[in-house]
Amino acid sequence: MNDSTPELKPPLWSWRRTTIAFFFIVFIFCLKDLGLTFNHLPDGADPWQAAKDFFSAALNPAFTDQNPSLPADAKPFLERIGENMLATLRYAFVAMSMALPAGLILGILCSRSWWPKKLQDSTSSSFKHYLLRLPIVLVYLVSRFFTTLIRSVHELIWVMLFLAFLGDSPLTACIAIALPYAGTLAKVFSEIIDEQDARSSDHLVYSGAGSLQAFFAARLPQSLPDLLTYTMYRLECAIRSSAVLGFIGIETIGLTIKQSYENNYYNEVWTGLYSLILVVMAFDILGAHIRKRLHTAPHALLNPDPNNIRALKRHTPRWPFMRLTWTALLFTSVAAWFIGEPLNQYHSHLSRWERTKTFAEGLLPKPVRESHAWSDAIPWAEKLWTTNGAEALLSTVIMASAALLLAAIFGYAFVPWASRNIASSKPFGLPSGHTSKVLTRLWSFLGWVVRTLFLIARSIPEFILAFLLIGILGPHAWPLVIALAIHNFGILGRLWSETHENQDDLVAKQQILSGGSRNQSYLCALLPASFNRQILFIFYRWETCVRESTILGLLSITSLGYYISLESSFLRYDSMLFYILLGTAVIFISDIISVILRAKLKNS
């Protein structure tokens, strides 16, 4: 080796190593704060016996009512389960039918791909440049702020707010789900659109087309497959959110599970859980088939005359499955509004206007209502912060962080066995000598088991999991943390395994062809290449965990949600809004940190 050749050494400090060290320190701090013992159980309670009684019922789900005192004319148990499951699906489709168009419009406004090409040029500094760019930037910033605001509040908190001023109708609950979902769809849609290859739209611009023409003719159609697949994922999430509405009294499958669990009818609980899991699995399988079709070109059966435009259009290759699926989903979304009981049933002696007026007046801080001086709101806010706010906020963040990092640790252990390009008898599709059929089937079975584990883990909403675990482990923070960790383990497992499967595996293949093992190619090539994307998913899920740990306070565990529920029950809407804004502020801060870290990791 030439002595003049400089020796290349990896830097001792990098953003990747700093990020890992930071996560490790946060995890240790969270464990120290939460403690590792369960000392909140009632006297004489045995968590192991409670867990045994509950989980043993999983082998014998109920098909009839366990309650012997029901009247003879009561609806059969399975009929009630079916009706509540259909109601769950109905509310999910209604919510998504509102969230999708709003999310698409906001997603386009939050994207920079439709900006005029000359205004995207950051090198220009003329006064005219800034003058032309100002209105567009204002639209962009207002849209980003609004989408972050509406998705920062959990849908159950939106339900509590909307029920206070719109009344207790199912439509109110659907709107409350649609609002944060529109914000989430807008955020993800804008990122999907901006990450598309710009060469096709640039070609149109350089050919004389306007920026908006190029956007709608090239960039948006190019993004359509990813937009549709993510929409299917959000529909799956909407089903889970709709199920949780049962815990605030709306008749969904969650209400059946709640009532059966409180009466110790565990066999009925598992029937409800199995029905929810099966429905979510069905939509997950449907989404997987849609993803496969959208990323696979159909074969043309005929070769029409290339000079006949009508013949070319008529014989354009299409998937009949896709047409049937989108038609069925569209029909179901429309039918959900009109089939069944009216969604906008209102039960109150007050008119909606009187209810809205009372709620709006209650949002003003009490000292301001009495003195009409906004300066009196400062001592009021300081008292709320020092009395309960700071402790509740810290507890919420600690539970969310501990749950997510716990899920990430187990996710990293299981994800390689779920990734189809790694967990295969031929890793990355490369021949590895003689492979028996038994070994091939074992690898296939192992991958299916782990992917099914991820699916089951994310099929049950965190709120329902926490509710069940509190009955077993007692009322303290760990059931909430475990419930959040299980759910996010399933979601991170899916997202990370798909990242591995979609990652450019050229380096990993080269390592295997050079004599490396499967584990070496994963740890030294594929994992480092996927690291940045995985960290972004962690921050994305952390926002969700903060929202979820906030709402889990409704289960009487000290967090922001506990005080939100408490203030709402006493109709103190001003204090309720204060605690909601605390959680929103955390989401805004995490969004800023995510943007900064994304840029740093991209350049590291």
Image (spheres, rainbow, N blue to C red):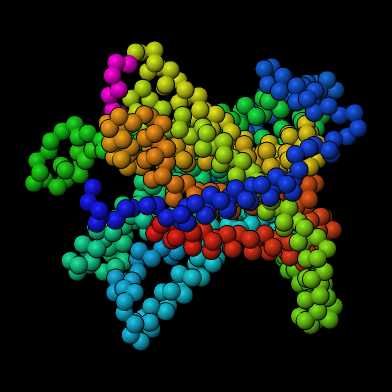
Highlighted magenta segment, given as a residue range: 429-435
Viewer-proximal residue among 248 and 433? 433
Give the x, y percent position of residue 257. Answer: 71, 32
Q: In which image quadrant can residue 244 be found? A: top right
Q: Where is residue 270 in the image (x, y as percent from the top left)?
A: 68, 25
Q: Quick one: which residue is furthest to the front in this view?
A: 3
Front residue of 21/105: it is 21
Q: Nearer the viewer, residue 126 or 567?
A: 126
Q: Does 430 appear in magenta?
A: yes
Q: In this view, does 48 lie above or below 291?
A: above
Taking the image as drawn, is residue 242 in sight?
no
Q: What residue is at 26 percent from the left and 60 percent from the top?
A: 201
- In the rendered view, does 389 fall on the left or right side of 218? right
**Count of numbered circles in the view:** 0
291 drawn magenta: no
- For this view, does 253 lie left or right of residue 436? right
Q: Which residue is drawn at 81% across and 55% down?
A: 566
Q: Position of residue 131 (x, y in %)?
A: 38, 83
